[in-house]
Image: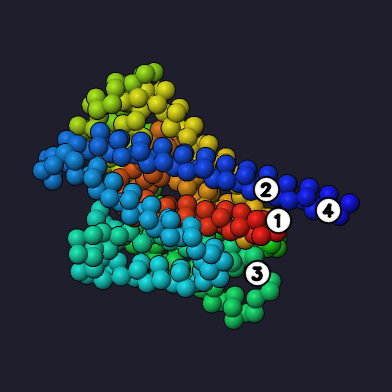
Amino acid sequence: MTGFLIEKFNVELNKMNDLLEKNGNFLKIIIGTLVTIGIIMIYSASYMYSKEVHGSSLYYMWKQVIFALVSLVGAFIVSKSKYQFWFKNSIYLNGLVCGLLVLTFIPGLGVTAKGANRWLNFGGVTLQPGEFAKYTTMILSFYVFEFFEKMTMKERVKNIGCLLLTFVLLINQPDFGTFFICSCAVMFACFLSNFPRKIFYSLLGGGSIIAIALMLSQPYRVKRLTTFLDPWANSKGSGFQIIQSWIGFANGGFLGKGVGNSLEKLFFLPEAHNDFIFSVVGEEFGFIGVVFLVSLFIAFIFMGFKVALMMKDRVSSLLTSGVVFIIGIQVVLNMGVVLGLLPTKGLNLPFISSGGSSLFANFIGIGLIFSCLNRQIESRSNLS
């Protein structure tokens, strides 16, 4: 009887491992497809601009290919590590990112563009620390809220202080988009963790008030809100970008104009290969292409949360959920902006838009998912 139960238990473990591996492979296929589409669309959206500015129509495409390869190596390394390491040392990881954020304010290291200090320049290679802050704040938040009641007052002050420092630095860059995503990540972590509900709802209410106050504190943010409500009121100024985006989608129709045939990318649509690349997808591949791309992201989010729910270890489940949430909310915000459903903000489309820091940070997040998944498979295999 005992032997029968043990055999049945082993069969169930093997089934669970097979299902985890199958879902993990499905995630890899989705991510690989998204990155491939991204490289194709970056070339299509940038070849004229790239030729004009850099002298080569392939500049941004090859740049993204190199970033993708480097990011893949980074994700592979993280996937082979123990996720417990990243979780237990989250305060140091976030502290490191805070240090990089501080460097953006130092002349010579920091790069100022469009009135913001968001980038670092290391020998011609630019880095945007805010992209990594999205993940370090998420991991640290899970650590703080999951063990909040077990921490001493000194530990609470140290960890929460490190979190708050990140937000202070982001808002002073200023980078309100990353600030907002990090805030959402903190609330998400707080909601899922073993944290007192009463305090959570108080934090949610207080955080919402602070966010609204920050949005209204600067004239350019107020202008973005008013432009979002009626872009035609200043069609040649603040409303120009969103109107051009709408024209791109309208030109695409149902089947699109064909890859490479977008007109809006020809110096009409600003940031065509970056923040507004979704509009180029709409123009060149039409409604069908838009639905396909949205479906890929929905499949990624669904499968990501499904994998998280299959984790038998709570920490791995939380971390997997956090990574999926951060990528998912960036997708929603970017598409919402490009479709004119949300106020304009400089947020790129994960895996699709041009940008090395974003791609590398998101791949590190993917590596963390597979670190959790691999450890789960190993632990179940050891049990059997």
Q: Would you call the spot at circle 4 few (<14 residues within 10 Å), some (14-19), or many (20 or more)?
A: few
Question: Is disc 2 in contact with disc 4, using a CB cutoff of under 8 Å?
Answer: no
Q: Residue at x 24, y 24 (%)?
A: 261
Q: Where is residue 35 drawn, in percent x and y?
A: 37, 41
What residue is pinned by disc 2?
Answer: 14
Q: Residue at x 26, y 71 (%)?
A: 106
Question: Is disc 1 in contact with disc 2, using a CB cutoff of under 8 Å?
Answer: yes
Q: Is residue 124 left or right of residue 249?
A: left
The amino acid type found where label 4 is placed reads: Gly
> Rounded to the nearest whole Å, what is the CA distance between mark 2 and mark 4?
16 Å
Q: Residue at x 56, y 77 (%)?
A: 157
> Rounded to the nearest whole Å, what is the CA distance between mark 4 and mark 1?
13 Å
What residue is pinned by disc 3?
Answer: 147
> Rounded to the nearest whole Å, what is the CA distance between mark 3 and mark 4?
39 Å
The amino acid type found where label 2 is placed reads: Asn
Tell me which colouring the rendered structure shows.
Answer: rainbow
Q: Residue furthest top?
A: 254
Q: Is residue 298 visible?
A: yes
The amino acid type found where label 1 is placed reads: Ser
Question: Is disc 4 in contact with disc 1, using a CB cutoff of under 8 Å?
Answer: no
Tag 3 secondary structure: loop
What residue is pinned by disc 1?
Answer: 384
Between discs 3 and 1, the one toward the N terminus: 3
